[in-house]
Image (cartoon, rainbow, N blue to C red):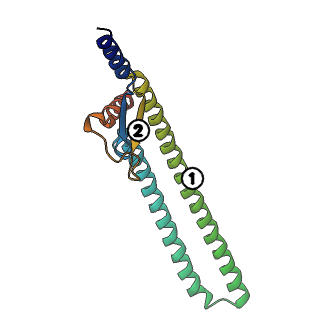
């Protein structure tokens, strides 16, 4: 009787000490979030507007260069050099402005994506605590989780919670 009791107690202790494990497919979780899709759509619009602006300014500069080449034939050397210098300075100024604008768009995009990733990490931690998980692993292309039972995949549950919270 004592042995049976010890065996049951040992099994009970062992089963209580088992860690609750799960994993999340990082790529799927982030890429399928509605918030990320909305961010991408917003930045796609910004990038398209920037591209149109850049193309328009390039066309204008090219037209001014062609116009200058025609007029330069009738100018004296000093006047042509001064006009060319002015045109190049204007062209460089516009190029610098466009580069700064492009960098600002990239920085804003990266900042918002980083913020989203931080939000997801925090939510996964809260999900783990709330649902009694000891560990939640992140699966990715690099192979941090090479195999996991489908029943341990928490990606859809967490993504659904995040999308619901985002809709509110």
Q: Residue sitting at 56 percent across and 87 percent down?
A: 70
Name the element at disc 2: strand
Quadrant containing the N terminus in the rendered view? top left
Q: Residue sitting at 67 percent across and 72 percent down?
A: 89
Mark 2 surroundings within 10 Å by alpha-carbon count, few (fewer than 14), some (14 through 19), many (20 or more): some
Q: x%, y% of residue 35?
A: 39, 39
Q: Quadrant of residue 125?
A: top left
Q: Nearer the viewer, residue 158 or 77?
A: 158
Q: Nearer the viewer, residue 167 or 52?
A: 167
Q: x%, y% of residue 16?
A: 37, 19
Quadrant containing the C terminus in the rendered view? top left
Of circles 1 and 2, the one toward us is: 2
> Among all residues in the image, which is located at the extreme right?
78
Q: x%, y% of residue 111?
A: 53, 45
Residue 22 vertical position relative to residue 141 in the rendered view, above or below: above
Residue 33 vertical position relative to residue 88 in the rendered view, above or below: above
Rounded to the nearest angstrom, the CA distance separating label 1 from label 2 is 34 Å
> Among all residues in the image, which is located at the extreme left?
150
Q: Earlier in the sequence, mark 1 or mark 2?
A: 1
Question: Which residue carries the number 2 mark?
Answer: 137
Mark 1 surroundings within 10 Å by alpha-carbon count, few (fewer than 14), some (14 through 19), many (20 or more): few
Q: Nearer the viewer, residue 86 or 133?
A: 133
Residue 126 vertical position relative to residue 82 in the rendered view, above or below: above
Name the element at disc 1: helix
Q: Residue sitting at 51 percent across and 48 percent down?
A: 110
Q: x%, y% of residue 44?
A: 41, 52
Q: Are marks 1 and 2 in contact (CB under 8 Å)?
A: no
Q: How many dots with numbers?
A: 2
Question: Which residue carries the number 1 mark?
Answer: 104
Q: Nearer the viewer, residue 156 or 145?
A: 145
Mark linked to residue 59: none
């Amino acid at each position: 009787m004592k042995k049976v009791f010890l065996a049951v107690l040992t099994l009970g202790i062992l089963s209580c000490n088992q860690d609750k494990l799960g994993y999340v497919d990082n790529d799927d979780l982030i890429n399928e979030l509605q918030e990320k899709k909305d961010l991408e759509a917003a930045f796609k619009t910004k990038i398209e507007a920037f591209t149109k602006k850049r193309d328009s300014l390039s066309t204008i500069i090219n037209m001014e260069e062609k116009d200058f080449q025609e007029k330069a034939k009738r100018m004296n050397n000093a006047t042509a050099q001064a006009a060319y210098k002015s045109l190049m300075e204007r062209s460089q100024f516009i190029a610098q402005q466009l580069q700064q604008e492009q960098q600002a768009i990239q920085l804003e995009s990266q900042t918002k994506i980083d913020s989203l990733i931080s939000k997801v990490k925090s939510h996964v931690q809260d999900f783990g605590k709330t649902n009694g998980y000891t560990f939640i692993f992140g699966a990715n292309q690099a192979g941090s989780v090479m195999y996991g039972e489908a029943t341990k995949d928490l990606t859809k549950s967490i993504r659904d919670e995040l999308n619901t919270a985002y809709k509110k």
